[in-house]
């Protein structure tokens, strides 16, 4: 799978990349939504930070879904309430992972997204 990693924090991007590498997938990293938008057509999965300076991850997900983007999307965020999870899912996210990131949990979620793509 080709996975897009979108997070304005470099350390977070690197940690996400470690999880993706452990799954054996290729990836591209972006520090903002605008850069990532041009690469959605070639992606199989999107790992998207919620709180971004240019556009929130949730707004980006809504926009992507309104343009017909069907790939699995995992929102990554420091937000962890039920309401936040509900908002992300209503926007079109498939999964929700809270920071600090547990690499093993993220790997499991990436594997689940891959399984859903092949079914």
Image (cartoon, rainbow, N blue to C red):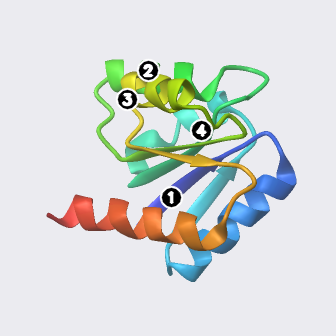
Q: Are marks 4 and 1 in contact (CB under 8 Å)?
A: no
Q: Secondary structure at mark 3?
A: loop
Vertical placement of residue 35 versus 22, above or below: above
Q: At 79% across and 39% down in the image, what residue appears?
A: 8
Mark with earlier residue (1, 3): 1
Q: Quarter of the image containing the C terminus?
A: bottom left
- Gap between marks 3 and 4 measured at Cα: 17 Å
Q: Residue at x 60, y 77 (%)?
A: 21
* Mark 2, other Cα within 10 Å: few <14 / some 14–19 / many ≥20: some
How packed mark 3 is, by other alpha carbons closer than 10 Å (few <14, some 14-19, many 20 or more), is: many
Marks 2/3 in contact by CB < 8 Å: the verdict is yes
Q: Earlier in the sequence, mark 2 or mark 3?
A: 2
Residue 10 in the image: state x and y as whole percent.
85, 52
State which tag comes first along the sequence, 3 or 4.
Answer: 4
Which residue is labeled 2 in the image?
62
Q: Tell me the quarter of the image containing the N terminus.
A: bottom left
| Mark 4: secondary structure | helix
Q: Secondary structure at mark 2?
A: helix
**Residue 43 placement (x, y as % from top left):** 43, 51
Going from the N terminus, do you reach mark 2 or mark 4 first?
A: 4
Labels 4 and 1: the sequence-earlier one: 1
Residue linked to disc 4: 36
Measured in 3D between alpha carbons, the distance from the residue under mark 4 to the one under mark 1, in whole angstroms, is 11 Å
Q: How busy is the neighbourhood of tag 4: few (under 14 within 10 Å), some, or many (20 plus)?
A: many
**Element under disc 1:** strand
Specify whether 2 is left or right of 21.
Answer: left
Q: Is residue 82 left or right of residue 11?
A: left
Number of residues whose C-alpha sits closer than 10 Å to that of mark 1, classed few (under 14), some (14–19) or many (20 or more):
many
Q: Residue under label 3, please give it.
A: 92
Q: Is residue 53 left or right of residue 41?
A: right
**Residue beneath disc 1:** 3
């Amino acid at each position: 799978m080709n996975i897009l990693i979108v997070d304005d924090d470099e350390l977070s991007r690197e940690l996400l990349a470690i999880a993706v590498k452990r799954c054996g997938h290729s990836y591209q990293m972006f520090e903002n939504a605008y850069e990532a938008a041009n690469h959605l057509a070639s992606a199989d999965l999107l790992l998207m930070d919620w709180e971004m300076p240019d556009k929130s991850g949730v707004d980006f997900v809504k926009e992507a879904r309104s343009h017909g983007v069907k790939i699995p999307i995992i929102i990554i965020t420091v937000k962890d309430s039920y309401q936040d999870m509900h908002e992300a899912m209503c926007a079109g996210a498939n999964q929700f992972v809270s920071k600090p990131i547990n690499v093993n949990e993220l790997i499991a979620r990436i594997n689940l997204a891959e399984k859903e793509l092949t079914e």
